[in-house]
Image (tube, rainbow, N blue to C red):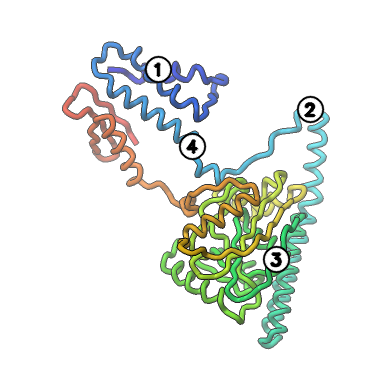
Amino acid sequence: MINNDQLKSALQDALTYCKLNRYDYTLTQNDLPKLQKQFEKALRKKAQEVQNLNHFELTAQLMGDFANTMIQDSFTECFKSHRRNSWNTTPFLYFLYCIGVVIRYGFLLPLRMLIFFATVVISAVLLILIEVLIPHSKFKKTLQLATFRKAAQGFCLSFFTVIRKHGQIHPHKPGRIYVANHTTTFDFAVLSSITPFSTIGQKHKGFQGFIQKYIVSAIDPVWFERTDKKQRKSVAELLKERTFDESCSCSMVVFPEGCCVNNRFIVQFKKGAFDLGAEVCPVAIRYGDGSLRAYQNSKKQNFIQFLVGLWTQWVMLVDVWFLEPLTLNENETADEFAHRTQLMIAQTAGLVPRQWDGYLKYVQVNDTMKKEVLDANAKKLGLVVEEQGDEVSFSYSGSTQMERKVVQ
């Protein structure tokens, strides 16, 4: 039998060679086999009196799997916010930093807020007047699109956005749809400041919902609830109808990732926009390395906090590439077409492709999932899991020598 102190001591011995300082360790993928062997060796040393070491070998394997999971977590790194390395390490640099804080929060923040909210109010009023006073006509739609484009340019101005456009924009025509990677809500404003687009996306409430209702409504967008599967199906049919509608005055742009990703990675493209039989025009968007606040991490900040972050950075640099149109190849599935487009955008923008479903970002780990992992690991160790109320007990099958309780 080996107790918890011996197990902890064995793990510390195994990690000695990769210890960085008192609290931190440096682990890479190549360290995992060595770590597992070191841990097995330490366990054997601590448990020489134990005749059957299979359990300890399995424990070492589980510890190796645990370390491997931490190192290879290629999902959460797609949504992790990154911070700029500290540079104000000397008194003079710290003095310059303090001056920068005063300028950004004392001057730029109120100026940019004024520009942003003036854009919201003026655009909303103009679009409401156009909708009420001008009868339905081609002139009315042209005026709405022009006003919406000016609103998008006003939003970009409030963030001091510098847009570098690469490639030619392909003119609107029925049966053509644009797809782009997604970093922030204002990806759409960046694209629409170049040329007006319609879009499809998640319906929001609050201030963001106000902008959707009174400003973005000018380009006839399609809104839906992400959690409503039935609504998503009807939206897919509406998307196809809109893509081939000859009366639409601007092209649709779709963000097939379905969520915002942190400007370093690009996750799986949903096939919805790729099985319409339409011509797909890829658009690659990449924000500059100095624009770390461009990524909208909805799990850590609300919309207003995100706006304040954009208003208090010096400038937002963004490159936009309009790539050549693509069509579905012979014997190619919609999923393969989506993957091919994803890789083209990733290569153009210098992003790392990942085949994770972005909707997993919104999935909460429930007790059933935890129990499945618990049962699987217990089976590897030959343990019997017994639940009694809020307590879970483990014991070796066929043996009562060792039992410990873990209170959840």
Q: Where is residue 93 in the image (x, y as percent from the top left)?
A: 80, 32
Q: Can residue 226 be seen in this view?
A: no
Q: Nearer the viewer, mark 4 or mark 3?
A: 3
Q: What element carries label 2?
A: loop
Label 1, label 3: how far apart the Cα atoms are: 62 Å
The tag on residue 72 is: 4
In the rendered structure, which disc, 4 or 3, sits on the residue that comes first in sequence?
A: 4
Label 1, label 4: how far apart the Cα atoms are: 24 Å
Q: Where is residue 311 in the image (x, y as percent from the top left)?
A: 73, 52
In the rendered structure, which disc, 1 or 2, sits on the residue that comes first in sequence?
A: 1
In the rendered structure, which disc, 1 or 3, sits on the residue that comes first in sequence?
A: 1
Residue 401 lies, with reference to residue 302, above or below; the image says above
User: Is 166 positioned to the left or the right of 336 in the image?
Assistant: right
Q: Name which residue type carries label 4.
A: Gln
Q: How many marks?
A: 4
The tag on residue 90 is: 2
Q: Nearer the viewer, mark 4 or mark 2?
A: 4
Q: Name which residue type carries label 2.
A: Thr
The tag on residue 169 is: 3
In the rendered structure, which disc, 2 or 3, sits on the residue that comes first in sequence?
A: 2
Q: Name which residue type carries label 3.
A: Ile
Label 1, label 2: how far apart the Cα atoms are: 42 Å
